[in-house]
Image (cartoon, helix red, strand yellow):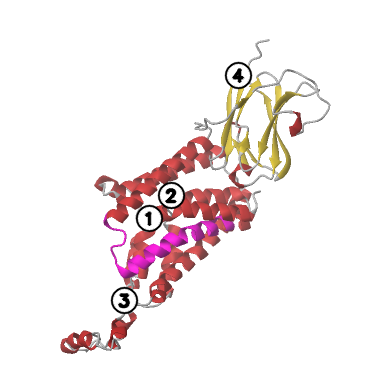
Amino acid sequence: MPSSITLLITGVSTGLLAGGASCAAVQGGLLAGAVTRRDPAEARVPARTSSTSAKKRPRTAAPSPSGRAASTASPEPTVGNLAPVGAFLAGKLFSHTILGALLGIFGAALQPSPRTQATLLIIAGALMVLFALDLFGVKVVGRIIPRPPASFGRLVRRSTKTTSMATPALVGFATVLVPCGVTLSMELVAITAGSPIAGAAVMAGFVLGTAPLFTVLGYLFRRSSRALSGRLGIATGVVVLAVAAWTIASGLQAGGWASFNTGSTTVAAAAPAPSEGGTGASDGPVRIDATGKQVITLTVTDFYVPTQFTAKAGVPTTLVLHGKDSGGCARAFTIPELGVQEIVKRDGDTKVELGTRKPGTLRFSCAMGMQTGTIDFQEDTK
C-alpha cells in the first residue's frame, strides 16, 4: 500500500492545485453564511436603544485632531475576521478525516475494480462541469445541479444571528455531506488506500491543501458578502472547468479507454536469447528468458519508464514492475482491461502474469490515470 505520508502529500497537492476552487464553488455559500456573523459590538447594543442615541454614536467615534477617538471606529481586527474561518476549517478537517478513515476501512474490505474507479472519476468530472456552468449563470444547469439540503440553509441563516464559534465549526463539519467534484476523486483515493490511517491521511491532506483559498475567501466574506460575485465567480468557474477536464481525462486513462501520452520512445521486443540471470531489470525491458517466456520490465520511480512497449503475441508473458525509489500515484499500478491492481514495492520487483496475449494493445496506468502507458503485442513475422 502507498505510505500514509505519500498519500498525505498527494492530498495536499491536489487540494492546493484543484480542490480549493472546486470546493469553493460548491461550499462557498455555506462558508459565507457561517462566517458573515453579526458584529459582537452590535450584538451588545440593547434593543431599547433609541434611534437618536444610535445616530449620535458614530459622531462620538469620529476622528479628533489628536487621533485618539479614531481607534474606536477602526475595522474589526484581522484575528476577529479569521476566527470563524478557522472554526469552519477545523470542523471540515475533523469530518473529512473521519470520512477518510471509514473509506479506508471500506476499501480494505472491498476494493473496487480499476474501471469502477475510473467511471466514478468521470462522473465526478461531469458534476464539476455542471458546477462551472452554474457559476457562469446558465439557468438550465441551475435547476439540475445538487444543492445543499434546506436544513443546511436554515442552519446557515441562524449562524448569522450568533457570535458563537460552535456554529461555523458545525457548518464546516457538515460540508462532508456536500462534496465537490475533486473531493469525490480524493474519496476514491481514500478507498484505494486500503487502510483507515492511509484513508484519513488522504482526506486530511486534501482539506489542508484547500485551506489557503478558503481562508482568503472567508476573510473576504467577513469584509464583504459579495466576495464570490461578478468576476471572481467567473474566474472560479474557469478554474473548475479546467479541473473538470483534467478529471475526465484522468478517468478515461484510468479506465484504459484512452491514452494521451505521446512523449515516450517505444521499446521493442528483443530476439530470443536465453538468459540465465533471472528476471532482473538489468536484462533489458523486453526479453525472452531461458524457458521461452517473455519478460517485460517496467521501471517505476515517480513515473513509468518506458511507457510504450512492443512485445510478441502468442508467447507466455510476465510483466515485472521494478520499483526504484518509487513514489506517488505511480506506485498504484493498474491494468484496467484485466482488473489488475498492484502496489509496487518502493525498491524491488512485483510480478504480474499476463498470460499468452493475442495481437492488440494493452493499456496500463496509475490508479488516478495520471501516469499511463501501453504494451503493443504483435505477431512474430519471422
| Callout 1 crowding tier (Cα within 10 Å): few <14, some 14–19, many ≥20 | many
Q: SS class of the residue under badge 4?
A: loop
Q: SS class of the residue under badge 2?
A: helix
Dividing the picture into quadrants, the one containing residue 66 is: bottom left
- Magenta stretch in the rendered image: 201-230
| Callout 3 crowding tier (Cα within 10 Å): few <14, some 14–19, many ≥20 | some
| Callout 4 crowding tier (Cα within 10 Å): few <14, some 14–19, many ≥20 | some
- Residue highlighted by disc 3: 38
> Total label count?
4
The residue under the point 42% across, 60% down is: 213
Q: Is residue 62 left or right of residue 223?
A: left
Image mark for residue 78 = none
Q: In the current view of this chain or complex, which residue is farthest to the top?
A: 382
Q: Amino acid at mark 3?
A: Arg
- Residue highlighted by disc 2: 181
| Callout 2 crowding tier (Cα within 10 Å): few <14, some 14–19, many ≥20 | many
Which badge, 3 or 2, is on the more N-terminal residue? Answer: 3
Q: Main secondary structure of the magenta part?
A: helix
Which badge, 4 or 1, is on the more N-terminal residue? Answer: 1
**Near-viewer residue (141 or 43):** 43
Which badge, 1 or 2, is on the more N-terminal residue? Answer: 1
The residue under the point 48% across, 36% down is: 252
